[in-house]
Amino acid sequence: MRLEKFVSASTGLSRKEAGRAIRAEEVFIDGVMCKKAATAVTEKDSVSWLGQPLQIIGLRYLMLHKPEGTVSSTEDPVHPSVFMLLDEPKPDAIHCVGRLDVDTTGLLLLTDDGKWSHRITSPKKNCAKTYLATLADPLTGDDFERVRSEFANGVMLRGEETPTLAAQLEAIDANQFRLTLHEGRYHQVKRMFAAVGNKVVALHRESVGSLVLDSDLAPGEYRHLTPDEVASFD
Ligand code: URA
């Protein structure tokens, strides 16, 4: 690979900026300054820029504990973006795997691997997502059983043509419930509870597929997934 490409692929600099850094005598190969952008380098060469050793940035797979009040898009006129929480080279290459509402907390996956995120979000895959929902009104006894069975059979949401897929509802206490969905429609959890006359006042995503939010991650913190965690969506 050309030195210029290597520097670009390992720093987030554009090719042009990488070329400039090389000509500015900022880049060294095996301790020797190299001013030629076309120099061939391999993984075995140790390349450094401004004294920092460089490594090609591979695909990234991140688990973020999304805090309340952040948006899953890159820009918002009012709220900070989750991307401000990342300390990654080439942040522009990273996208959220599905979205969470601004007031929803919990597990948000991010990656720069489009195929991987498609495997998780594709409607054909029915990937399970589990949410903890706190409701405005208590839901107990026969009322709970009725809602549990409605959710298991599918609910017709306003403006939609097909009922929701079977979802599993579990009571934690009178106002808190664990809901597992196998699809991802717009504001789905809130709309499902609204369809049965209740209101979600707090929502937290606990898991996606077999991946559970790491309890070591405080809101706003993230970590890279392990290779096994990445492969769990294959
Ligand atoms: N369902 C919702 O209503 N909101 C979310 O953020 C995620 C699922």
Image (tube, rainbow, N blue to C red):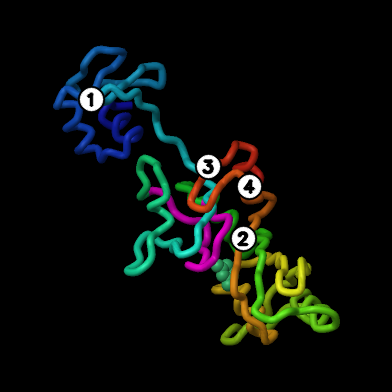
Q: Which residue is mark 4?
A: 215
Image-quadrant location for residue 191: bottom right
- Residue 223 tag number: 3
Name the residue nearer the viewer: 94 or 162. 94
CA gap, disc 4 to disc 2? 12 Å
Q: CA distance from mark 1 to mark 2?
A: 48 Å
**What amino acid is found at the position of numbered circle 2 in the picture?**
Arg
The residue pinned by badge 2 equals 205
**Between discs 1 and 2, the one toward the N terminus:** 1
**Which range of residues does the magenta coloring cover?**
93-109
The residue depicted at 61 percent of the width and 60 percent of the height is 205
Residue depth check, mark 4 versus mark 2: number of the one nearer the observer: 4
Q: Secondary structure at mark 3?
A: strand
**Is residue 55 on the magenta stretch?**
no
Amino acid type, mark 1? Ala
Mark 3 → mark 2, Cα distance in angstroms = 16 Å
Number of the front mark, 1 or 2? 2
Given residues 202 and 222, the one toward you in this image is 202
Work out whether residue 126 can be spotted: no
Q: Is residue 218 above or below residue 197?
A: above
